[in-house]
Amino acid sequence: MSTPTGVLIFSHDISYAFTKTTEALANACTQLGIPAIVRDSCDTRLTEMVIHEVTDPNISLKIENNIGKHWDKIINDFNINCVLSLDCGWFVLPDHLQDHPSIKKIYSIWFDDFWSWTKAPTNAIFPYRKRTFQQNISDPKITHCFYGTGIANEAALMGFHNQTASKLAAPKEFLSYNYPCEITNKIAFIGNPGYRGEPLDMTIKMMDRGADLIELREHSREHILVSLGDSSWKWKDLHPDIKTMVAYATEVRVQYPYESALHILQLCGQKYPEALHALNKSGYILDVAWLIKLVTRYDRPALVRRLYKAGLVDVISNPLEWKPYGIEASNSVFADEMPKYYMKYLAHINAANATRDATANEKLFEISACARTSINLDSPDVRACYGENEIFLVNTLDEAEAVAKKLIENPDLALTMGKRARRRTALEHTWEHRLKNLFSLFPS
Amino acid sequence: MYPAPDKVYRSFYVFSDDINLANTRRCYWLHLALQRLKMRSFWRDTTDARDSLKVLNTNELSKHRGVEGFVIGTKLTEMAMFGWIDAVLSPDCDWFFPHTCLSTYQGTKTLISWWNSDILSNLRRATYEFSSIPEELTLPKNYHFFPSPARLKEGDILSLPNTHLLRHGAPLEYLEIEIDPQIKDRIAYIGNPHFNISSDSKAIPLLKNGSLEDVRAIALEEIFQAEIISVWEKNFANIRQLIESATREKLASPYKPTLEIIAEQSTKHSVTLDFRSKLSLELCELVSSVLKYDQPFIISQLQQKNLITVYGDRLMWNACGIHSEPNTRWNELPKITARHTAHLHLPNFRNETELEEQLFISGALGRTSFGLNTPDSPFLEGQCHLSEDTSSLANSIQEQLKAPEKLLQDGVHAKEWIRNGHTLDHRVHLLLEVLTT
């Protein structure tokens, strides 16, 4: 095995979450003794957004050349032979890094889902010169790393064959923090509701009368099917079987919430091949997959709300987004104060963002690294990371409520499990572990 | 909306302009030093933004000039919301590219310039034309740290706010590196010529065959051939006389800040100058250039005696008739530095800094240096081999190279000297003390 001589890491500083994890990756490289330089692609992407409509193509070319020269200088001066980023953060100048003779390997550690990444206007890319997007991302120099079986499966179906499984992780320094546990009569949830659409009044009423996850998924499914009746979905009339296929796919998703939406569509395609073909050919397949993912959109907010209404949880961050759920969340915390907040509470709730087909999110590892246990929905990905004496896995809201009560009644149990979760993180789940593993793929 | 930070300074945005490798390298070390001091540090570059903005500011795209605020402002706001930019720190004014953004941004308490290169060269990299030192470098929240007493003096003449002395330092991580020397019969010089020599310069043959006085005479001749002088004369009748006496004074006192000389001579010649103006800075550069051939001359002389190996930009050195090994990449710096038993250290005529960074880097890697005695030499506490003039410098090198073990022992002492007070961690600590008191 050979290790990189220097790593160029691309950030996208328009997103704080992206920046935070990029810094964790850079620190992990430093810990491994590999020099790492972080460069932000935000300025250049936003510049491209501005110049996109300019008529003179030479202007774009001139900026591209300047950026290319800058990167070449960094690569040369700092002996860089490896490029790394979350998502496709490195992918700003098509072809440039893939064709660079010094660059031996490019790692894309997927953080967001592919559909959201491509839709974000701030992810502007300079024009394709030699290859198409598909050809670019399929370059054998690139390894796409996916943190869940669903998201990996989805990517494989989209042609990301050069992929590897690599879970998210926690910064190593979290293992050394020892802030006091100040609040033992409540657990905490730090984060937003996930999918940003407002809930229906009916949904809130259902939650109030104690609807559990399956019922809420069914309800969400029904809402999706009703919305197919309006005209906003351009793809729904491409083939007469599409609506039926979506009904079928959402039904499967209710039963198998952790199966990737695209895979579900692929399976449904066996029954409705022409409908699938029409969606695939028209490029709307990801839009439909996204809609199917929304079957589980209430999982996270329902879990948080149930425990909030029972007086068992403090909700922290994004007060405006929680308001429609009748939750008074406290203000967001500084990113570097997160460990303090994790450790302030006895335990945490953790639930995945419905729009991503991956459930072992970064917070799972961060909470554990801070020696706190968490209550999670029982998905195969989460189960693969921690044992049942380290975290809690639940399938219903009733179970979650019971576990939260048990922890508050028995704080020692919560803290003991947290210690075990920290130990597991130290052994298996820091960014150093991930990078060591990824660099084992680095060509000699 | 967000809780107040519990420390005065807890997060730094470190900026480099990657066009300058030395600054980029320095930023990397500063970034690591800040992290060791438990500060949150983000290290980014300004190069792409500068280059993009330059293009946007031209022709068809001039209407998009407002993109500057949008592009930089949007992301800074995002980061600042999470309390990540208490202070901005950079070598020189590498942070200064969107010329209002960081200065006006309320979330940033302090803008720190730790100077290395001269101010004029830095402002030439700005994204717009300037006529004097911009206001954004002179605000109460600006802090200017200078690596030498001469630069500090210059900063005070320019009336820059919050000026402090903060010398160069060495990266802490270099103290842990131990590499055996391979070349014991020649010292090394790592660096580039301090200017691009013109291929028709009459000084080129004299670098080999002339004297220091000869090359300085050529430099003086070239100063008075500068076309800009006749432009200046239109507004300042006595400017030529001022330059004559200033260059004379610079030759007599090479380590006296040129701006101080110009300030004195302008009074004498009744030339009223705004010292912050571009003209004054250009005048300084011109007068200082009377010493520009010193560095290639000394190196050429040593190379002829086979006492030195040069590592730097081959084309630039070849233009001076000097052979150079290729430029040193940053990760090769320890290996190349430690390859020789000792190094040559020469100040840059533009910088008014007698003790350059490479001197500290060599020390951290356990190598002593040879150089010229200057008013700032006492700071070294005897760590270098200093000579009074160029000929005694060559003799000293020749003599000391005969005892390589002694040179290596001096290097061991240099490393201890650095370890005990001259790493970048020490410097950052001092910087934080200044900021918080």
Image (tube, coloured by chain):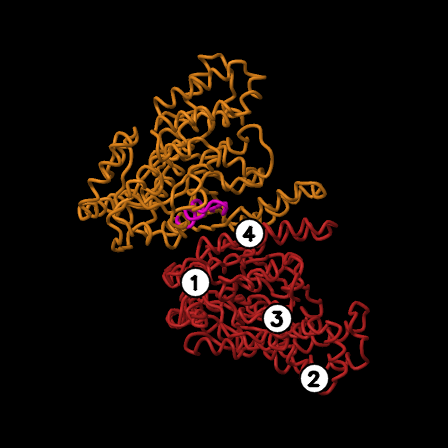
Do marks 4 and 1 share a chain? yes
For mark 2, does the 10 Å Cα neighbourhood hold few (<14), some (14 to 19), or many (20 or more) residues? some
Identify the disc placed on residue A268.
Answer: 2
The amino acid type, in three-letter code, at marker 3 is Ala
Q: Chain of mark 2?
A: A
Q: Measure the alpha-carbon separation of dots 3 and 2.
A: 20 Å
- Whichever of callouts 3 and 4 sits on the residue coming sooner in the sequence is 4
Q: Residues within 10 Å of mark 4 (few under 14, many from 20)?
A: some
Above/below status of A372 relative to A331? below
Per the image, the residue denoted by label 3 is A354
**Tag 1 secondary structure:** loop
> Position of A1 compared to A18: left or right?
left
Specify which label sits upstream in the sequence, 4 or 1. Answer: 4
Residue B22 highlighted magenta (yes or no)? yes
Q: Report if the CB atoms under discs 1 and 3 are less than 8 Å apart.
A: no
Q: Quadrant of residue B264?
A: top left
- State which tag comes first along the sequence, 2 or 1: 1
Q: Position of residue A302 (x, y in %)?
A: 60, 70
Residue at image point 67% right, 58% down? A127
Q: CA distance from mark 1 to mark 3?
A: 24 Å
Which is nearer the eye, B53 or A248? B53
